[in-house]
Image (spheres, grey):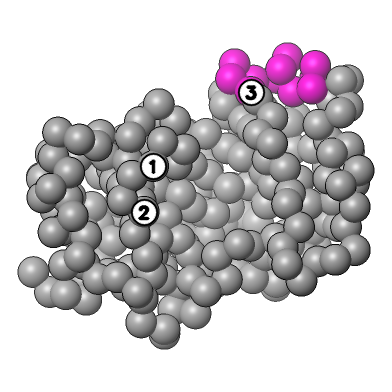
Amino acid sequence: MAENLINIGDIEKFSIVDWPNKIAVVAFLQGCPWRCPFCYNQSLQDFKVEGNASWDNLLHLLEHRKGVVDGVVFSGGEPLMQANLAEAMEIVHNMGFEVGMHTGGYNPEALEKVISKLSWIGFDIKAPFETDKYKKITGGFGDVEKIKQSLDIVIKSGVNFECRTTCDPRFLDIEDIYQLADTLSDLGVKEYHIQKYRPIPSDTATQESACEKFFKDEKLAAYLKSKFAIFDMRK
């Protein structure tokens, strides 16, 4: 198998947090079209950079993880940037592993090609579906219709999935989360989580109280619980 079938930035050999209720190997794929200001994986953003791991590394690891882990999560970066992602997922599936993916949903056409391979998706919703808000968070991507198309593909597929939002107080406020809750619930999303923003090293201005405000708002928590069958606050 070609060593460069997909460009892998790094591999997590054993994870219990990247796929709920599953033990997984995580392949962090190189390349992302977005530049989110809260990103902790900035080393994965440049698609042209050769990753620190390889496809062969992943296959070799999986041969020794059979019966030990449940599945493989293709994370990033943004996995949908990889032209051979569907082929890679098929190979992993044929080895006996379930396949999961983390995505921001920026490319619905690419998502269509892999959706049938997936058992679970973690779908990152960056902001309310408004062009200006998405542009601010992603570093310029404002085609929210593509995000909606991707979410619609996921919902109609029947694949198990969650939506989640990182609550960066520099770009989102509590009213944004109310707005998202209404929109996602109306679209048919059943599982939603909000995640605490932890300041990246270059952010020396954001205070802990600002990060915590989303999680201390009892009215917001009650509202979100009323909107989704599954909801929690990830701190």
Q: Is mark 1 on a helix, strand or loop?
A: strand
Which of 38/150 is in front?
A: 38
What is the CA distance from the residue labelled 1 to the residue labelled 2?
A: 7 Å
Amino acid identity at mark 2: Glu
Report the quarter where the N terminus lies: bottom left
Residue 127 sits inside the magenta stretch: no
Residue at which label 1 appears: 15
Residue at image coords 37%, 65%:
10
Q: Based on the displayed image, in which of its 4 quarters is residue 80 positioned?
A: bottom left
Q: Evaluate if marks 1 and 2 touch, with contact meaning CB atoms under 8 Å apart.
A: yes
Amino acid identity at mark 3: Phe
Amino acid identity at mark 1: Ser
Residue at which label 2 appears: 12
What is the CA distance from the residue labelled 1 to the residue labelled 3?
A: 21 Å
Of badges 2 and 3, the one in the foreground is 2
Query: Magenta residues, as a range?
Result: 221-231
Q: Based on the displayed image, in which of its 4 quarters is residue 234 positioned?
A: top right
Relative to 199, does residue 204 appear above or below in the rendering? below
Relative to 54, does residue 79 appear above or below in the rendering? above
Residue at which label 3 appears: 231
Q: What element carries label 3?
A: strand
Residue at image coords 90%, 63%:
205
Report the quarter where the C terminus lies: top right
What is the CA distance from the residue labelled 2 to the residue labelled 3?
A: 26 Å
Q: Can residue 131 be seen in this view?
A: no
Which of 116/88 is in front?
A: 88
